[in-house]
Image (tube, rainbow, N blue to C red):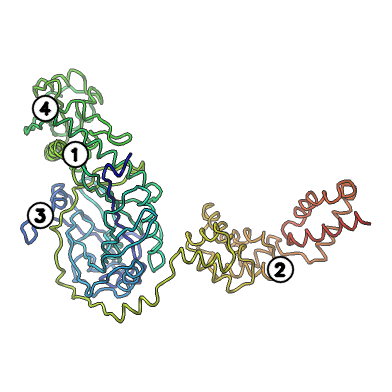
Amino acid sequence: MNYEELGLKMGLEIHQQLNTEKKLFCPCKCELIAEKPDYKLLRYLRPTQSELGKIDRAAFEESRRKLEFIYESYDHETCLVESDDEPPHPLNREALEIALTIASLLNMNVVDEFHTMRKQVIDGSNTGGFQRTGLIATDGHIETEHGKVVIENLCLEEDAARRIGEKKGKIIFRLDRLGIPLLEVTTDPSMKHPEQVRDVAYQLGQVLRSTKVKRGLGTIRQDLNISISEGARVEIKGVQDLDTMPKMVENEVKRQIGLIEIRNELLKRNASVDENIHDVSKLFDETESKIISKAVSKGGKVLAIKLIGFKGLIKKEIQPGRRFGTELAGYAKKMGVSGLFHTDELPAYGITMEEVTSIEDHLELSNQDAFILVADEEEKATNAIKEVQRRAKTAMIEVPEETRKVLEDANSEYLRPLPTASRMYVETDIPTTVIKRNDLEEIRANLPELPDEKKDRIIKEYGLSQDIANQLVRLERADDFEYIMSKTNLDPTTVGSALAYTLKELRRDGKDISKLDNEVLVETFSLVDSGKIAKDAVNEILNGICDDMGSPEEIAIKLNLVMLSESDVESIIDGLIEENIDMIKERKMGAMGPLMGKSMAKLQGKADGKLVNKFLKDKIQNIISG
């Protein structure tokens, strides 16, 4: 695809949890809790009008679902601030300082005062129906091979409650995550190529990881904003894998192109959406469709709408494996129904050709018309079919602005309308925080080393290979490496390889590598440094520590890994020389390879390879010359 001709524009939002001792507006710890909750709260949330009398469209749609929200809480790990039963405490200064550090690393203009705002959110993820957030800095930038990308805003806000599960009409959240300090980094929409998005996300991640941020799954979340000139801005939420970002962009562009083609065809056909909703339940009195019969048997309804001129377009593929009908179904599912049926896929799912014909006759369909069916409880079915009507009407006009959820196959599905601007209010319970210039200058004078700078430095200072240095930085082991090197005189490559590769292999094998702290690693490498064990024995020692076999020295003794003395090594090699004297006389120095293998097998890692090689080489040369 020619992205320049299509007018592709992309922006990125990154949300990163900060690794502070306390939450943003209360003294609770920033830890997720696995124990059974002590009590539960039940809340209903509703949208409110802004000062201009407007209601945010995303909030309005959520309210139509009429959900109950259950919040799991604790006596000690959470408090009344999270449950919105106590005013927020003063702003966490540690979180503010980390935010200012990141703003400085991103070349941003820091505001003079931090104002806490309330951003309306009624999907249940905040007990009060809003999220507290505030602007830290604006107008930063980073450089990429495709050009400069502007960092528009950096905000400090509280993370949402953790979603635990969903029952019929109820969503369960846990309050342990609510209030953890969260940074939101937003770029401008200046990215024009899919690969550039991945590059920017990587660079921003490098900046964030150079400071006190949380690590691990769920601690960083990325949202991707994509549009093309004839399409619309779409926000894809929950992107985790940077490598799939270019594919997501490609698939979203294909989706918008497909929707534009459908719109153009609908306009050619002079298509329209019938406003009437038809109850066709009686046409299915003897149906073999399990979905429909189940709905009707429980007192539900089968509702139908007429789409004039839509025939054949509902099955049109707009993303790999996803059709326009999937788009319509996404809107219906948000109202709680399991799905919908449409003309282009019937007869199927137990619905017979006779039933299809009876619906077509009932709705008075022409050859180019289509119908949509929804079967469920009457209220849910009605809300769902109205959403489908609304989406079908939009299809004749434009690509809708939406928030979508990323899927594993790099496609996306409808989540909710894109929020409007009418949802931000000043927080009256928190005073303004003045950002003093002296404090900011001190932060800027002590900025942390960025990961790429650290990688280049450790390559230069320690002579590490590019690959090992890359792995140490990527796995956030570079500081551990330098600490260990400050405590031993060991070869840097030996230490670097163990941290970059051995620990990763142990974790992959299911070992608890948290037991391998820096002090344990120093103790292990000191055994190599002092000549008590060979370098090749390090892996076995570390594996033994993970299995709780004792201290590094105790494990070396238990596993018979303690190095032999030089005289013992020489004695063993003398015996091998005597056993293989004929091969040495025949092959001469060509016997080095086989004898080296036999020697190392015999010594079982209890001798340094360089020493073994020296003994063998000297003794073979003496035999040849002698």
Give the residue pinned by disc 4.
Answer: 280
Give the residue pinned by disc 3.
Answer: 55
Q: Which mark, residue 332?
A: 1
Q: Secondary structure at mark 1?
A: helix
> In the shown orientation, is residue 194 left or right of residue 69?
right
Query: Callout 3: 10 Å neighbours few (<14), some, many (20+)?
Result: some
Q: CA distance from mark 1 to mark 3?
A: 22 Å
233 up-or-down from 26: above or below: above
Q: Give the residue drawn at x 24%, y 65%.
A: 82
Nearer the observer, disc 4 or disc 3? 3
466 up-or-down from 404: above or below: below
The amino acid type of the residue labelled 1 equals Ala
Q: CA distance from mark 3 to mark 2?
A: 73 Å
The one nearer the camera, 218 or 142, is 142
x and y percent of residue 147 in the render?
35, 56
Residue 607: name its quadrant.
bottom right
Mark 1 vs 3, N-terminal side: 3
The amino acid type of the residue labelled 2 equals Gly
x and y percent of residue 328 in the render?
20, 36
Nearer the observer, disc 1 or disc 3? 3
> In the shown orientation, is residue 301 left or right of residue 559?
left
**Residue found farthest to the top:** 354
Mark 4 vs 3, N-terminal side: 3
Q: Quadrant of the N terminus?
A: top left
